[in-house]
Image (cartoon, helix red, strand yellow):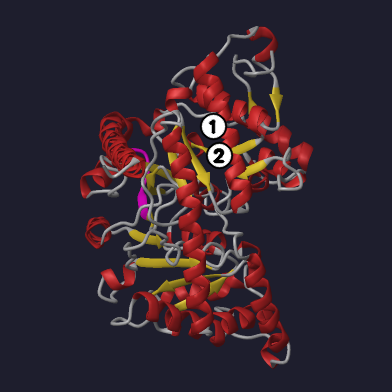
Amino acid sequence: DEGPEASFSLMNDVQAGLGAFIATISTFLLIQQSKHEHNTAAENYEGRKTSEPPPPSSEDQQALKNETRLSSRGLKAKAPILSYFPLFMQCLEDPASMENQSGKIALCVAENKLLQGRLSERFKQAAARAFDRKECWEYNDMSGLADMKEAFAALYTRLFSPTHPVSASHLSVGAGAASILNNVFSLCCESGAGVLVPAPYYAAFENDMKVVAGLVPVPTYCADPLSGPTPEDLEAAFEVASRTRQVSMLLLTNPHNPLGVVYSAETISACVDWARKKGMHVVVDEIYAMSVHQPGSTFRSALDVLGGKLGDDVHIVWAMSKDFGSSGLRAGILLSHNAHLKKAMENVSVFSGVSHPMQLMIADVLSDDAWVDSYLAESNKLLNKCYDIVTCALSDMELPYSPAVGGMFVYCDMSSLLPEATWEGEEALASLIFDQAGIVLTPGQAQRDAKPGKFRICMAWNSIEVLDMAMERLESVVDSIRDRGWVDLDMEERDDRTEGGVRRRGASWIGNE
């Protein structure tokens, strides 16, 4: 009696309920699968196969020094930061847009470019005032100008720790989070020491640890990666790593990159308690603290979780790069109650400081509460929209993903598409996606995942229109693999072919035959 409209409404309700049920089951299976993978990964991380070549012999090392006129430190610094960086550079040379729909699309950079116009206008206003200040032109406190430290202290206190205020006296300014991390690694740990990092993790952490500080990342595999490391997870990784080296630090990222989860207060507190029993430092990278985009989700800073008591062993890092889409500004903050570390940071900041005009501009912006609140609200609304675009497309492709509440990425499982369940198979899929769709993703191997076939999709580096385009292209490749399968090629012809920094492994270009 109610007509066809009621029937359509009922069908839509059924479809929506079925979609929610499938997403729930997908998430449950992903967690169970991660728990299974944990059983062997924690014990065997040092023996896991990676694409890194063996170190050169002493004779080869000397020959390289003679050829390049570099020291051993210089040779180490010369190594590529990221395996997929050459492909990213191709995206910069020919970026896709609505006017250039045949261009390449980088989904491998965790950077929020959605509100660059608004940022530009606000920083122009700040610049008009910054150069009138005498501090702009003079030497000053190498740990950072009072303006920037006080602005950050007020902002972080207001947003994350109103009952335990941040003191500007506990802050050090540096040229971005990578620079600050590098300095903290160097100043707190001896060369060759191990750093526990819950895996998968941000691929460039390894560069931050290795190049100057000479530290060794220790991928730490969790029984439930979405909930974060437990003392048992940490103990398993520590027990294996400590057989060959001193383990001096635990590095946490919260909100997590690449999983996009926010660790609970209980997880943070348990990790710190465990590390303190071992006499280890804990660094908490909170660079995505203001990019929690799912309604109803919240973030608690380690400062608040620990009751404002960081001691001399817990250090918090934040930077403008992510929450304010300003990685080009190269400006970050270290919050530490260790007075000796702060003094050491003042000295090394001579080599990695932030220019005074930039500090004054940042202070101007961060002190504008109304603008900051409006900007972050709009940014997270757009991040939420991008997240929906990516996850809806992945659901349509029947590809599992980790439900995220923060950050600017989605971590998905494409292992079902691999020609073989190996790291070579992952490289082949990454290569195929680039060849067929012009898309660069962050591969799981670079993030030390335990299982081949995981990829990070960064959702805010492109416009929303280009993101839509990217997911359509990706779906086309997925459909091609499922419809046609992988076709073996002449191994002699293909095995040694390299293009754009990605090694091809015996698989065809689907659709090009």
What SS does tag 2 mark? helix
Q: Quadrant of residue 282?
A: bottom left
Residues under labels 1 and 2: Cα distance? 6 Å
Give the x, y percent position of residue 34.
30, 35
Q: Nearer the viewer, residue 335 or 189?
A: 335
Q: Is residue 174 left or right of residue 398?
A: right
- Residue 496, given in percent of the width and then of the height, sits at 67, 17
Asked whether residue 454 is drawn in magenta, I would say no
Part of the protein shown in magenta: 241-250
Read off the residue under disc 1.
475
Q: Where residue 264 is drawn, which disc sits there?
A: none
Identify the residue shown where x is 45% and y is 46%: 410
Q: Residue at x 33, y 32 (%)?
A: 41
For disc 2, the neighbor class at 10 Å (few under 14, some 14 to 19, many from 20) is many
| Label 1: how many Cα within 10 Å (few below 14, some 14–19, many 20+) | some
Image quadrant holding the N terminus, namely top left
The amino acid marked with disc number 2 is Met
Q: Is residue 243 magenta?
A: yes
In the figure, is residue 108 to the left or right of 256?
A: right
C-beta proximity under 8 Å, tags 1 and 2: yes
Q: Is residue 349 left or right of residue 340?
A: right
Report the amino acid beneath label 1.
Glu
Q: Quadrant of residue 392?
A: top left
| Residue 54 in sight | no
Quarter of the image holding residue 6? Answer: top left
- The residue lying toward the viewer, choosing from 114 and 318, is 114
Q: Quadrant of the C terminus?
A: top right
When the figure is inspected, residue 44 is found, relative to residue 369, above or below; the finding is above
Q: Can you see residue 152?
A: yes
Residue bearing mark 2: 471
* Residue drawn at 59 percent across, 15 percent down: 507
